[in-house]
């Protein structure tokens, strides 16, 4: 892992790092992740070659922000929307997205969810009503097509039936491309982290999207040491969630020499790119 000096951080808002353990022959197509600033919520635009995915859709009330950023990035069609789990700060913008002029080919979501009451309908199904699209439910081991790379679902391994543990039903994705890798964790908390670590499914990734907005109930030392990333991205807004990012999480990341960026530090979002094994980011 390469560390960036405080002097360079003061001078640069854009920097490059060598991706750890990159393949000897780097892929030619750039892998990018735009973590959009939709306040405390999650929405991430993933691109590689001709493939375009949107991972989570933020909250309903901030859909116009999401839509504007997508259009500014020339997104007219999305291969797949991936909803990591059922919470409204991840699924809230789905219905408006489906009603917009952006074409969505597929919708994916976790096979597991914990309703708060008997008979409650999954919010993903509610958002897709009358669209003609049925969601594809993903489990560990599933893969999705990515031009010039791979998307592999590594979690969850088991269903959490307690609504209070819904975050640990989050899809966890490992994405490779551009000669590097990213781990995207949804709102994964300690129970899901422990299950994936115990199963040996967590491996090095150059970039990690920190789970659950950087709250203290996620991001263990064991997880960070197994991933050993160079760059960590946190989707949050302290005004919305005063306990994020948690000081423990920030101390952990800083102690490992990991560069940390937060969506609330940008107007539109944080764009992370990997090309030929080189990692860079810009605050848009």
Image: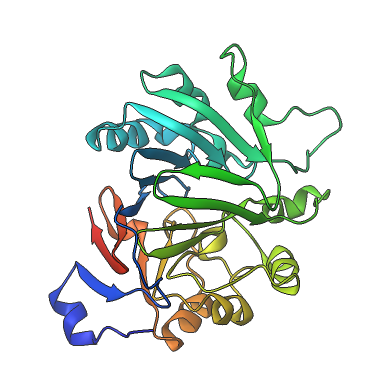
Q: Is residue 34 left or right of residue 143?
A: left
Q: Residue at x 24, y 87 (%)?
A: 5
Q: Is residue 56 left or right of residue 258?
A: right
Percent x, y of residue 244: 49, 65
Percent x, y of residue 71: 27, 31
**Rendered image quadrant of residue 193:** bottom right
Q: Residue furthest right?
A: 118
Res 66 seen here: yes
Colour convention of the picture: rainbow
Q: Residue at x 22, y 52 (%)?
A: 284
Q: Nearer the viewer, residue 178 or 187?
A: 178
Q: Nearer the viewer, residue 68 or 53?
A: 53
**Rendered image quadrant of residue 125:** top right
Q: Is residue 139 left or right of residue 208?
A: right
Q: Quadrant of the N terminus?
A: bottom left
Res 243 seen here: no
Percent x, y of residue 120: 78, 29
Q: Residue at x 41, y 71 (%)?
A: 23
Mark count: 0
Q: Residue furthest top?
A: 130
Q: Residue at x 75, y 73 (%)?
A: 198
Say above or below: 62 vs 244: above
Say above or below: 17 vs 95: below
Q: Nearer the viewer, residue 281 or 276?
A: 276
Percent x, y of residue 183: 51, 62
Q: Residue furthest front?
A: 25
């Amino acid at each position: 892992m390469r560390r960036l000096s405080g002097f360079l951080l003061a001078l640069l808002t854009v920097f490059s790092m060598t991706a750890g353990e990159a393949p000897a022959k780097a892929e030619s197509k750039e892998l990018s992740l735009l973590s959009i600033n939709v306040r405390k919520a999650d929405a991430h635009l993933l691109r590689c070659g001709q493939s375009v995915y949107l991972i989570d859709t933020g909250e309903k009330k901030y859909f116009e922000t999401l839509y504007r950023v997508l259009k500014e990035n020339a997104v007219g069609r999305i291969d797949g929307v991936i909803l990591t789990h059922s919470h409204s700060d991840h699924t809230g913008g789905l219905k408006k997205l489906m009603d917009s002029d952006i074409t969505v080919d597929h919708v994916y979501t976790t096979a597991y969810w914990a309703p708060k009451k008997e008979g409650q309908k999954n919010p993903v199904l509610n958002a897709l009503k009358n669209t003609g699209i049925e969601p594809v439910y993903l489990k560990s081991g599933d893969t999705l097509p990515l031009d010039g790379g791979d998307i592999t679902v590594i979690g969850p391994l088991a269903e959490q039936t307690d609504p209070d543990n819904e975050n640990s039903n989050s899809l966890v994705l490992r994405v490779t491309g551009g000669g590097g890798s990213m781990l995207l964790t949804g709102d994964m908390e300690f129970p899901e982290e422990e299950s994936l670590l115990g199963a040996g499914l967590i491996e090095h990734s150059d970039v990690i999207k920190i789970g659950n907005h950087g709250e203290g109930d996620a991001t263990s030392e064991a997880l960070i040491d197994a991933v050993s990333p160079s760059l960590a991205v946190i989707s949050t807004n302290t005004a919305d969630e005063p306990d994020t990012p948690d000081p423990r999480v920030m101390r952990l990341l800083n102690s490992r020499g990991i560069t940390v960026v937060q969506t609330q530090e940008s107007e539109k979002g944080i764009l992370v790119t990997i090309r030929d094994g080189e990692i860079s980011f810009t605050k848009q």
